[in-house]
Image (spheres, grey):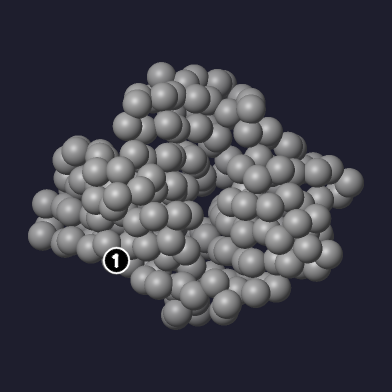
Amino acid sequence: MIEKRSFESLGHADHGWLNARHHFSFADYYEPARMGWGAIRVWNDDEIAANSGFPPHPHRDMEIITYVRSGAITHKDSLGNQGRTGAGDVQVMSAGTGVRHAEYNLEAEQTRIFQIWIEPTRTGGAPSWGAKPFPKDDRSGKFVTLASGFAEDSDALPIRADARVLAAMVRAGETITHEVAAGRHAYLVPATGRIEIAGQTFEARDGAAIDGGQTVTITALEDAELVLVDSE
């Protein structure tokens, strides 16, 4: 089964400096049918105004992946880590036993991100943070693994979860596939562009919840930037 979750159906919170859409229950948005998908607990579509952001706040026992769609995000945490992650690139924070962090848009323009939370396979452990550039040309017409809990994905940022975060750039008219193994869960969002899966059309920022045990064929109806999480 592939369930379409249209952008208009997502949870919505507008705080002025932050305009957020929630694919899953989060903060004041509660939807029992959308508590998570496999180990995926949060997928937020955030628009952060210039020179604003999230002040220091705590997390623990969660893998937090930030995919920057436009602009840039600057990270600071209680471990002393600091870094700026630009459009198309990724940062990962393993909260482990606990960490405080802040995420600011220090740019003169709006920043747009997907922030994805994945439940770890084990609790505890020392918290950590990392970021890495992923040139969009390298993922033309194919999925590239950005973050992974599997040792064989040595070029990806490590996470402590039975999951992979992947991205692809697909030109209009092109088709790519992804196999979702039995017992697993995939969630796909086109950051930009319009796509078709199994006869359903997905606009930019719609979500597709995909059951395991099938190979998904994705056709780009427009040039599209895809982000996909495959988890237990």
| Quarter where residue 121 is shown | bottom left
The mark total stands at 1
Residue shown at the point (57%, 79%) measured from the top left: 138
Q: Is residue 48 left or right of residue 96?
A: right
* The furthest residue to the right: 199
Q: Position of residue 44 (x, y in %)?
A: 47, 39
User: Can residue 122 be seen from the camera position used here?
Assistant: no
Say which residue appears at 54% left-offset and 72% top-offset.
136
Q: Residue at x 25, y 40 (%)?
A: 52
Q: Which residue is labeled 1 in the image? A: 130
175 vs 64, nearest the viewer: 175
Instruction: Tell me the residue at 35%/48% (across/down).
Output: 109
| Residue neighbourhood size for the residue with mark 1, other residues' Cα within 10 Å, grouped as few (<14), some (14–19), many (≥20) | some
x, y percentage for residue 47?
Answer: 42, 40
Q: Is residue 57 above or below residue 171?
A: above
Amino acid under disc 1: Gly
Q: Is residue 70 left or right of residue 31?
A: left
| Farthest front residue in view | 108
Pick the residue in front: 2 or 71.
Answer: 71
* 73, 117: nearer the viewer: 73
Q: Report whether residue 173 is seen.
A: yes
* Residue 193 vertical position relative to residue 46 in the rendered view, above or below: below
Q: 157 or 196: which is nearer to us?
A: 196
> Is 112 on the left or on the right of 207, as rendered?
left
Residue 186, horizontal then vertical, whole percent: 64, 51
- SS state under label 1: strand
- Quarter of the N terminus within the rendering: top right
Residue 174, given in percent of the width and then of the height, sits at: 80, 68
Residue 183 shown left or right of residue 175 in the figure: left
